[in-house]
């Protein structure tokens, strides 16, 4: 069942998308969300601002993640969540998705 909310949507702007990576800038107004989604590829998040995220999982579990500008983090494919700006200021991060490839692809 898809969760219905009145939250504004985060704005994602794809900066690069090729056979190896997808780079997207995500901008969240206060209270904005991504909507529930599953990550197809491993990814790195590079925060452009400080901020607080509320993370909700399909089973209703909630957690918070504090982002610090310039301090990146990595997650493996398969993460299933909704990401919400829990702060009072705009939150911005760059997401770099790492598409699978092998040395033979070079």
Image (cartoon, helix red, strand yellow):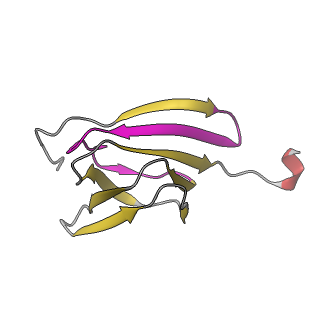
Comparing 56 with 89, the one in front is 89
Residue 78 position in % (x across, y down): 46, 60
Q: Is residue 47 magenta?
A: no
Rendered view: 97 above or below 57? above
Taking the spot 42% from the left edge, 33% from the top edge, the residue there is 12
Q: Quadrant of residue 7?
A: top left
Taking the spot 21% from the left edge, 48% from the top edge, the residue there is 88
Residue 63 position in % (x across, y down): 26, 69
Count all numbered tags in the image, as a single digit. Answer: 0
Q: Which residues, given as a range, are shown in magenta?
A: 17-41
Give the side of residue 50 with respect to residue 84, left or right.
Answer: right
Give the side of residue 88 with respect to residue 13, left or right.
Answer: left
Rendered view: 76 above or below 26? below
Taking the spot 15% from the left edge, 48% from the top edge, the residue there is 3
For the C terminus, the quadrant is top right
Give the side of residue 21 with respect to residue 7, left or right.
Answer: right
Taking the spot 30% from the left edge, 58% from the top edge, the residue there is 53
Give the side of residue 84 with respect to residue 43, left or right.
Answer: left
Residue 5 position in % (x across, y down): 12, 42
Q: Quadrant of residue 21?
A: top right
Rendered view: 81 above or below 62? above
Comparing 76 with 14, the one in front is 14
Rendered view: 54 above or below 32? below
């Amino acid at each position: 069942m898809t969760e219905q909310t009145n939250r504004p949507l985060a704005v994602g702007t794809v900066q690069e998308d090729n056979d190896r990576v997808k780079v997207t800038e995500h901008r969240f107004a206060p209270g904005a969300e991504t909507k529930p989604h599953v990550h197809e590829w491993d990814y790195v998040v590079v925060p452009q601002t400080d901020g607080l995220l509320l993370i909700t999982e399909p089973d209703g579990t909630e957690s918070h993640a504090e982002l610090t500008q310039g301090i990146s983090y990595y997650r493996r494919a398969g993460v299933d969540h909704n990401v919400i700006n829990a702060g009072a200021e705009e939150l911005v991060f760059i997401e770099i998705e790492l598409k699978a490839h092998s040395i033979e692809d070079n």
